[in-house]
Image (tube, grey):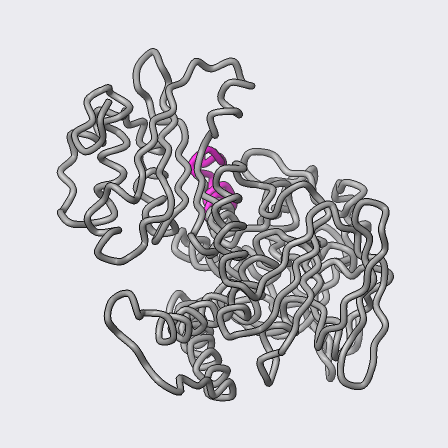
Amino acid sequence: MVVGDFPIETDTLVIGAGPGGYVAAIRAAQLGQKVTIVEKATLGGVCLNVGCIPSKALINAGHRYENAKHSDDMGITAENVTVDFTKVQEWKASVVNKLTGGVEGLLKGNKVDIVKGEAYFVDSNSVRVMDENSAQTYTFKNVIIATGSRPIELPNFKYSDRVLNSTGALALKEIPKKLVVIGGGYIGTELGTAYANFGTEVVVLEGGDEILPGFEKQMSSLVKRNLKKKGNVEIHTKAMAKGVEEKADGVTVTFEVKGEEQTIDADYVLVTVGRVPNTDELGLEQVGVEMTDRGIIKTDKQCRTNVSNFYAIGDIIEGPPLAHKASYEGKIAAEAIAGEAAEIDYLGIPAVVFSEPELASVGYTEAQAKEEGLEVTAAKFPFAANGRALSLNETDGFLKLVTRKEDGLVIGAQIAGASASDMISELSLAIEAGMTAEDIAMTIHAHPTLGEITMEAAEVAIGMPVHVVK
């Protein structure tokens, strides 16, 4: 310990101020704890600064541009529609700044001490926080680790000005003429779609059989079909990216499909093949926190590690890297520290892709339920039979409701269609509250809305549909 480094005491220390960390800190403070939060970069973490929020802003801007160019069937035409991409980026930054400023206000309003720097554990009750100029020791009763994840870097695709991760792709100063996307998961699909809408020629290289492998094939196929309909998107599945040659003004990407090696010239290549947990530079080995070979921290149902006063949440524990999962776990950890009997139940956590159309899923799919030995009913209702979808000219897609056969209990739902990301919340609530298909069918939904599709699917589930023939 350096001279003058007198330890600062806190009840609960939170490391990382992303959507998991800052929510955990606020909830812990609300429960009467003295809380300190440490962040080495910017409040809001990856999600607010270089992930969820800026990507959705870019996606929305791309939609606006595409709609301005292609609304002829509604009798609306526009000439010389242009994009000032510098202004797009400035607008996107303004959205981010409002939210990160809001996070700071919320933390201060809940009397959470905010500390800038990198944390390194000394022992199970103390940590050193270092910045460029100084180091300070903090002692704590409990700690919540919420350090998130970073993009995986492929050995043959080292990040550079032309080889991008998602952060780099969101910060481009111009719209690329051609972009290669390695990885057809949700990040690659979302960013590839955004740039395709701005007019970029996009080539997707996916190693698996389908893009968006975490969703049912019927859902991902809709997205794949719509991407191909754009005319400027090419998708290669079972494609292995081999390497990249960088030039002053672009890249040449080598890949292999069905044993045949091919090359593509493009302005940039975007690598989106997954994320790795940020657990390697915290000094966790000093404390003896158990981790997997991949650096994932092992936790129980209260997000507690094998070290009793150490908790971990978000991308650094098992499960999908979702911001709302991290926030949920942050509340559970804070409540557990406060002595409450809170436990994790992941069944009601939705997954969403802001593709075209949007995809959303919660609970069991039909196949997963059957694998668990459950007898289920799968009831579908098409967007094309909904008045609001027709008036929006967004008729692609369906809602599928998965219910337990014996009592109609809602145990899962999948949506492919406009505003699926908003619609899924009602179904998450239905699962969380233990509702049946009849409960949803008997709930009066406003007309005309996309929300009626949920009610209609529930009516199909109970065998009494009105707007489709049984």
Instruction: State the extent of the magenta-drawn residues as a range.
Output: 331-348
Comparing 397 with 455, the one in front is: 397
Q: Which of 280 and 11 is in front in this view?
A: 280
Residue lying farthest to the top in this orientation = 406
- Residue 152, picture quadrant: bottom right
Q: Is residue 204 above or below residue 338?
A: below
Q: Specify whether 334 is left or right of 172.
A: left
Q: Where is residue 232 in the image (x, y as percent from the top left)?
A: 57, 66
Q: Is residue 344 magenta?
A: yes
Front residue (pair 107, 399):
399
Residue 268 x, y percent position in the rendering: 71, 74
The answer to whether residue 340 is above or below residue 314 is: above
Tell me if I can see residue 13 in this picture. Answer: no
Q: Which of 305 and 172 is in front in this view?
A: 172
Which of the 4 image quarters holds residue 5? Answer: bottom right
Would residue 353 appear left or right of 281 to someone viewing this image?
Answer: left
Q: Give the residue at x 76% y 47%.
A: 295
For the point 45% across and 33% down, which residue is it?
A: 363
Q: In the drawing, does residue 107 fall left or right of residue 144? A: left
Q: Position of residue 85 (x, y in %)?
A: 51, 85
* Image location (x, y in percent) of residue 47: 53, 63
In reply to whether residue 258 is colored magenta, the answer given is no
**Quadrant, the N terminus:** bottom right
The quadrant the C terminus occupies is top left
Residue positioned 36% across, 39% down in the render: 428
Q: Is residue 429 visible?
A: yes
